[in-house]
Amino acid sequence: MIHYVSGDILLTRAQAIAHGIAANDPMTQGLALALHEQYPAMHKDFHHWCSREHPQPGAAWMWGGADGVRVVNLITQEGGYGHGARPSRATVKHVRDALRELAKIAEKEGFTSLAVPRLATGVGGLDWAEVQPVVEERLGHLDIPVYVYSEFHPGKQAVEPS
C-alpha cells in the first residue's frame, strides 16, 4: 500500500530506503550524497559491486548495514564508467525496470516497509508526473507500507501510517 508523505527520508522508520543512482555514481548530489555521508561503507561496497558486476540500467543492489538498515540502490541512469565520465539522465524505462527489481527484492527479503523518494526527478532529470504512475504500477501491489516521500523537508520526520 502506497502512502505519500512529507519529510526527511533519512528519518524514516521504514525497514529499507530505495533511491535512484547510476552505476559507479560518485554520490556527490542529492539523496545519494546524504546516504553516502550517513553510510560510507555502502558507498565503498556499491563501487566494489559495480566494478565486479558492471550493472546495466534497470538493475538493483541491496546493501545491509550493521544496525539493520537496508539501502536499495536502483540503477536508473546509464553509468559513468571511465575517468571523469558523468552519469547520464534517467529514463522512465530504467526506472520501471529498477522498480521491478526492487519489488522482487522486497518480497524475497521480506521487507516490512519501504521508503522511496520522488525517484529520478532530481539529478535524474525526469518529471514526477511521468514517474509517479510507474511507482504506483510497480510497488502498489506490495503487501507492505511503501512511503513515497513526495515532499522533502530536511530534519522533519514524516507521519508514516502503519
Image (cartoon, rainbow, N blue to C red):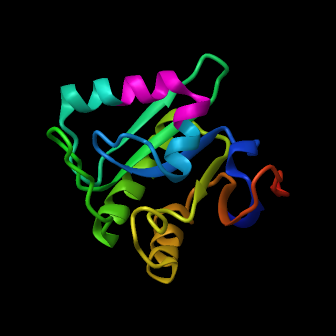
Q: Quadrant of residue 16?
A: top right
On screen, 66 above or below 13?
above
Percent x, y of residue 87: 27, 54
Position in image of residue 116 (x %, y %) = 58, 55
**Could you tell whether 68 is left or right of 49 in the image?**
right
Residue extending farthest to the top is 66
Residue 7 in which image quadrant: bottom right
Give the quarter of the figure containing the N terminus: bottom right
Q: Is 37 included in the stretch rendered in magenta?
A: yes
Q: In which quarter of the image is residue 26?
A: top left
Q: Does the magenta stretch include residue 109?
A: no
The residue under the point 46% across, 64% down is 138
Give the prevailing secondary structure in the magenta stretch. Answer: helix
Please, is residue 39 above or below residue 146 in the view?
above
Q: What's the magenta region?
A: 36-46
Taking 82 as reference, is 134 left or right? right
> Residue at point 67% right, 20% down?
67
**Depth check: 76 or 104 in front?**
76
